[in-house]
Amino acid sequence: MDIRIYYEDTDCGGVVYYANYLKYFERARTHYLEERGLSVAGLREQGTQFVVVHAEVDYRSPGRYGDTLVVDTTLAAASQTSFTFAHVVRERTSGRLVVEGSAKLVTVDEQLKVRRLDKPTLAALQGPPQTRS
């Protein structure tokens, strides 16, 4: 997934503000789910939500105003109640490593109590992207 860096994404030195990477990770996770036919809104309507319980970010080099960053997202671990995504962010033109990170999410119901994912949703989450015809 590509992220173009605008002035609003940066600090006064033109470097991507550190907390914005968590936003980029969130976008990439949503994109990951959508590629597998899952919708955050649809799951919520069915009573399933995801909450982040742990996140890590390792900053390797600065992203800067005008860069296009590529966020690569993979599913690192999954169970019926939680899953962990791994994220790698690179600058598109050079391939330079910018950030590595991860986020562990727990599946909860509307009262924020841990909930198991149904088998079809878990299978979709763990499966390959769907092809579009």
Image: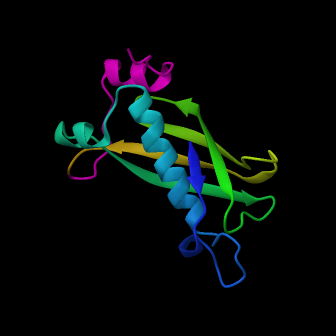
Q: Which is the main secondary structure of the residues drawn in magenta?
A: loop
Q: Residue at x 56, y 40 (%)?
A: 85
Which residue is at the front of the view, 100 or 5? Answer: 5
In the shown orientation, is residue 127 left or right of residue 70?
A: left
Vertical position of residue 10 compared to residue 66: above or below: below
Residue 108 lies within the magenta run: no
In the shown orientation, is residue 27 left or right of residue 14?
A: left
Q: Residue at x 50, y 37 (%)?
A: 83
Q: Residue at x 42, y 44 (%)?
A: 106
Question: Percent x, y for residue 6?
Answer: 57, 68
Which residue is at the front of the view, 12 or 20? Answer: 12
Q: Quadrant of residue 75?
A: top right
Looking at the rendering, in which quadrant would you find the N terminus? top right
In the shown orientation, is residue 17 left or right of residue 110?
A: right
Which residue is at the front of the view, 53 or 120? Answer: 120
Question: Percent x, y for residue 73?
Answer: 59, 38
Q: Residue at x 80, y 45 (%)?
A: 95
Which residue is at the front of the view, 45 or 117? Answer: 45
In the image, the segment drawn in magenta is 111-133
In the shown orientation, is residue 15 left or right of residue 119?
A: right
What is the residue that sits farthest to the bottom in this orientation? 12
Residue 117 lies within the magenta run: yes
Question: Percent x, y for residue 70?
Answer: 65, 46
